[in-house]
Structures are given as C-alpha cells and as structure tokens.
Image (tube, rainbow, N blue to C red):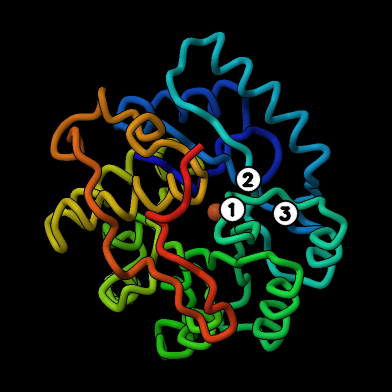
Amino acid sequence: MIDMHCHVLPWVDDGASSLEEGLALVEVAAASGIGTMVLTPKVDPGRHDNTRTNLTRKFDAFRTLAIRRGLEVELHLGAEAILSPAMMELLGRGEVPFVGRWCGHDVLLLRWQEPYIPVGAVGAMKQMLDQHVLPMLVHPERNPGVVRFPQALEMFVGEGCLIQVDSASLIGTHGPEVEATARLLIERGWASVVASNARSAIESPARLRRGFEILADLYGADRARALVVDHPAALLRVDPNEAAGLRDAPDPIATDEVPTLPPEFQISGRRSPGFVHPSNVSVH
Ligand SMILES: [Fe+2]
C-alpha cells in the first residue's frame, strides 16, 4: 500500500513528538503492508510554521535514520496545507511541498480548517489552478458542512479537484455520519485516494490496512487497490507494485497483475478538459 497522508515526521506539527515515535510509526506502517509513505507535515503559518526549506532538511535527516534502522518503507516529503491567506502566500513563493504531479499540475494536499466550506475556498481553488496547482481536498467527509450537504463538493470536483478520504472515517472512528459520507464520496467516484492520516500509536498507519479491507469488502479488491495503491502511485509517478511493497504484502493485495484503473479517477473538470486517465501517465 501507499500512504499519502501521515504525520510521522517528528517535531514539526501535532504528529510524532519524538524521533523514536516517528521511526516506530514507520515500523508499524511496514508491518501492516505499507511500502511507501508520503510524510505530510502541516503547513499552517502562525500555528505550524513549516516551509519547504526547513522541512526538507528535517525530512532528509529522518529518512537517513530510517534507512540506517533498516526500515523498508520508501519515504517521500509532502505537506498538508491549511487554507489561509498566509499559506497562499507561502504557496506563491514555492515554499509548500506537494504530494505529487497530475496532468501538468503539482498536487497540493489541502485542508479546510473550518467546520464548514470556507467562504474563500472557491477563489483559492481557482487561484491555485491558475498557478498549475491542483488541490487534493483532505478528508472533506469530516467537515460538518460537507456531511450536511455533500453536493457542495461538486463544484470542486467539477473543476478537477481530487479528494482524499481518511481510512479512519471508513472504519467508523469519527461516527456513523462521517462514515456514511466517506462511503458516499467513494460511491460517487469523487474520492481518488484513501490514506491513514496517522500521527500516533493510537491513530496508527495500520488503520490504512483496515480501511483497505473495508473497501475490498464493500467495493471489491480492485477498487480498494486503486484507492490505496494505483492512484497514489500515479500521482507519485512510481511503479505501483514496487512502491506498494506488494511482494511482501499479505493477501488480498498481493497480485502479479496491475488491473486497469477504474473510471472514477478520470478527471473531466469543466475547467481542465485536458486531464486524462492516470493509466496514461508515464511511470518513471
Ligand atoms: Fe493530517
């Protein structure tokens, strides 16, 4: 599996609070069948004052230690950007790490902090798209405004925005309404990635495995694999089997065949008709 959202890089946000805790979480991830993790510290000026420059130094040191420890998980640096004017300013200066590339756009993990869809969300999205930045909305199923009126997301999906669902939402950790909304986003084909959002031993990377199992039960193994392996691999532009560590993963993920990606990941936004199916993206 590939985990595109976690807070295991220590001392940078409200995730891992020590080097040992961060490394232990990577170890748990490996044991649960995760082969690649994108570390996504919060970029939230005034609260978590992270920038690409300072995060890169810390990430490089952490990755080196993980390799020395013998942890067989490929680590990438990304970020979870909290929408605000100050974050937009950092973004404009190239100081917010991305989680991948998609159809000529840098993919930004974007979170709305408010318990509703912020007034400036549409304008910010359009500003990002103008800068060839494609937002991937983080766990909108946990946003009370979206829970009440999921259809509000259509304007974002229609413009090409991607959606990431928390595995914990599928497990039911955040309650039945969030769980139902998470399923709805997947059933409508709006969600393209499911990730752990791990930050501690309790909120563990192993939740992604449980989320995969639930997806496989509800929608079949191919659809589950698309959400936790193939789509993340397409965004990272890596070989899905290698990145997911499939050779070591327990069934039912292990397979020699890469299935054709399901149609729900086609991006046919009104604004960006040039978006194409991820299977057409070359793998490097
Ligand atoms: Fe997060």
Mark 2: give few (<14), some (14-19) or many (20+) Cα within 10 Å: many
Q: Position of residue 225 (x, y in %)?
A: 26, 49
| Type of amino acid at the residue the image marks with label 1 | Arg
Which image quarter is the N terminus in? top left
* Badge 1 residue CB within 8 Å of ligand 1: no
Q: Real-space Cα distance between discs 3 and 1?
A: 19 Å
Q: Nearer the viewer, residue 92 or 81?
A: 92
Q: Quadrant of residue 22?
A: top right
Q: Which residue is mark 3?
A: 43
The residue at the point 68 percent across, 64 percent down is 133
| Type of amino acid at the residue the image marks with label 2 | Gly
177 relative to 265, above or below:
below
Q: Which circle's residue, 3 or 2, is located before the other in the chain?
A: 3
Q: Position of residue 183 (x, y in %)?
A: 27, 71
Q: Which mark is residue 78?
A: 2
* Labels 3, 2: front one: 2
Q: Quadrant of residue 109?
A: bottom right
Judged from the image, the secondary structure of the residue bearing numbered disc 2 is loop
Mark 1: give few (<14), some (14-19) or many (20+) Cα within 10 Å: some
Q: Which residue is mark 1?
A: 101
Q: Which circle's residue, 3 or 1, is located before the other in the chain?
A: 3
* Badge 3 residue CB within 8 Å of ligand 1: no
* Labels 3, 1: front one: 1
- Does residue 69 appear left or right of residue 57 in this picture? left
The residue at the point 24 percent across, 46 percent down is 210
The residue at the point 58 percent across, 35 percent down is 76
Q: Real-space Cα distance between discs 3 and 2?
A: 10 Å
Q: Which circle's residue, 1 or 2, is located before the other in the chain?
A: 2
Q: Real-space Cα distance between discs 1 and 2?
A: 11 Å
Q: Position of residue 177 (x, y in %)?
A: 31, 77
